[in-house]
Image (cartoon, grey):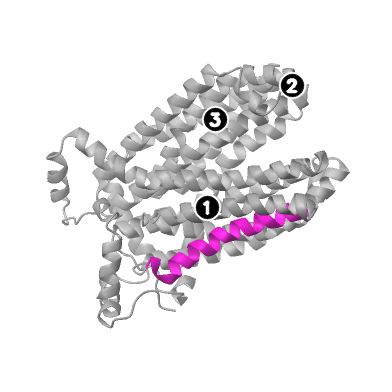
Amino acid sequence: MGSIDNEREGMSESQPLLPESSPNGQSKDLEDSNRDLKTKVWIETKKLWQIVGPAIFSRVSAYSMNIISQAFAGHLGEVELAAFSIANTVIVGFNFGLLLGMGSALETLCGQAFGAKRYRMLGIYMQRSWIVLFCCCFLLLPVYVFAAPIMRLFGQPDDVAEMTGVAAVWMIPLHFSFAFQFPLQRFLQCQLKNAITAWTSLAALLFNVLFSWLAVYVFGFGIVGISVVLDISWWIMVFGLFGYTSCGGCPLTWSGFSTEAFSGLWEFLKLSAASGVMLCLENWYYRILILLTGYLQDATVAVDALSICMSINGWEMMIPLAFFAATGVRVANELGAGNGQRAKFATQVSVVQSTIIGIFFFVLIMIFHDKFAYIFTTTEDVLEEVDQLSLLLGVTILLNSVQPILSGVAVGSGWQAYVAYINLGCYYVVGLPLGLILGWWAGWGVKGMWGGMIFGGTAVQTVVLAIITIRSDWDNEAKKAAERVNKYSTSKPENDELEDSADGDSGSSYPRG
């Protein structure tokens, strides 16, 4: 059983996450009760940061590629900067949120299957996700093809709209990379194989910086060249992750392409759609804020100031999003292994640590409330407006240190459809109308609009998710996880073990095909 034994040795980092459990879970309870709180927190912290560390690096790298590309577009001219920014943040951002959310269905299924030691099903789930997301990419193509008339409809000048259309069409390859990258990332993440994600992100970032410079300053390819470089950068990550997966990096979970991926697609699509709606409602929320700010008086200053605050928030948000991913994996792994109380403890540790980091950045923003905007501008009006918005930025960062972690619990537990309704109600029934009332009717401008959307939307949603999480019956959630794994699996656990044994005894090694 050479290949299987090697894989089990190679997964030594992940083994402490999922120690052997007895059917009634009594050995887990006895083991945990014999440890003091300090020891349990330290053990959970090591497991958590094994995911959080690489996730922060890879997310910051991916975010930086977009910012770097946008910066190079700014050196081409104002029209090019506006066009590339709109194509990247509005057109791509709209689809990114939906596809990212749909891909997060794998965090539930792969995480719980890995915890249940149904290793073979992880590869099947990933292939199903590829099929669903790839088809969805085709459905979203009109947004790219008709970007120019869409932008004209929203009141953009003709030259900006036309250039946005050009950039958007050249970003179609980037759009399709999401269909493969998001599932690959979650497939590897659920197995705690996070280092490869960080390394491929670094390679893509270095490529993006070098070839964006060549495209603009050496070859003069303009906005088309920058778009193509960004496309290739994201595909580098796809091929890097797939190469690692298919060339022996995941012998237990990747056994080659299988026709089983085409079975159960409807059930998989429903879970993916629920995940997509849940996350894209969050993703679009603050994009709407920027769009609505453009209709206020002194809109130029307001939009510039808000964009600076959102840029700072975007950079810092990579940390809570890494905790979102890590919490989803930890909760899913433990629930899949039948360890409801350990899933609860993982949630508590994650919330506390992320909140501490959020408090640190909140204090930092308050200390440098009148200085951090100098990174972006020296215009006095904008600096003054950013200063006035700094408290709202700090509160947003503080709330975002808790809310994504609770969303990660929802993903790890399979609550996506339920939370989608909560997001719709909190964000768009309460938060957005309150922001409009305070921004326009009360005359408080961007501060009223942002404040209403924070306290009426994000804060309410955080409180609701916190109540649901606190009141959860974690042992019952573990039972539901077992039922879910069986529902979405095409083979019985003993069949997976027999196949693994057969492959190992025959001397063959994964992957097959």
Circles 1 and 3: CB atoms closer than 8 Å: no
Residue 340 or residue 216, whichever sits in front: 216
Q: Number of marks in the image?
A: 3
| Residue at numbered disc 2 | 379
> Which kind of residue does numbered mark 3 sit on?
Gly
Mark number displayed over residue 501: none
Q: Which amino acid does label 1 sit on?
A: Ser
The quadrant in which the C terminus is found is bottom left
Label 3: element kind: helix
- Return the residue found at the far right: 158
Task: Work out whether 393 lies above or below 346.
Answer: above
Q: In this view, does 435 lie to the left or right of 419?
A: right
For the residues labelled 3 and 2, say whether their Cβ atoms are less than 8 Å apart: no
User: Is residue 228 rendered magenta in the image?
Assistant: yes
Residue 216 counted in the magenta span: no
Rendered image quadrant of residue 392? top right
Q: Is the magenta stretch mostly helix, strand or loop?
A: helix
Neighbourhood count class around disc 3 (C-alpha, 10 Å): few under 14, some 14–19, many 20 upward = many
Q: In the image, is residue 373 above or below residue 133? A: above
**First of labels 3, 2 by sequence position:** 2
Residue bearing mark 1: 201
Secondary structure type for disc 2: loop
- Whole-angstrom CA distance, mark 2 to mark 1, is 35 Å
Which span is picked out in magenta?
224-250
Circle 3 sits on which residue? 457
Q: Position of residue 454 (x, y in %)?
A: 55, 27
- Is residue 455 shown to the viewer in this render? no
Lateral position of residue 495 relative to residue 25, left or right = right
Q: Indicate which label's residue lies in the foreground, 1 or 3.
A: 1
Q: Which residue occupies 58% across, 29% down?
A: 431
The alpha-carbon separation of the residues under discs 3 and 2 comes to: 31 Å
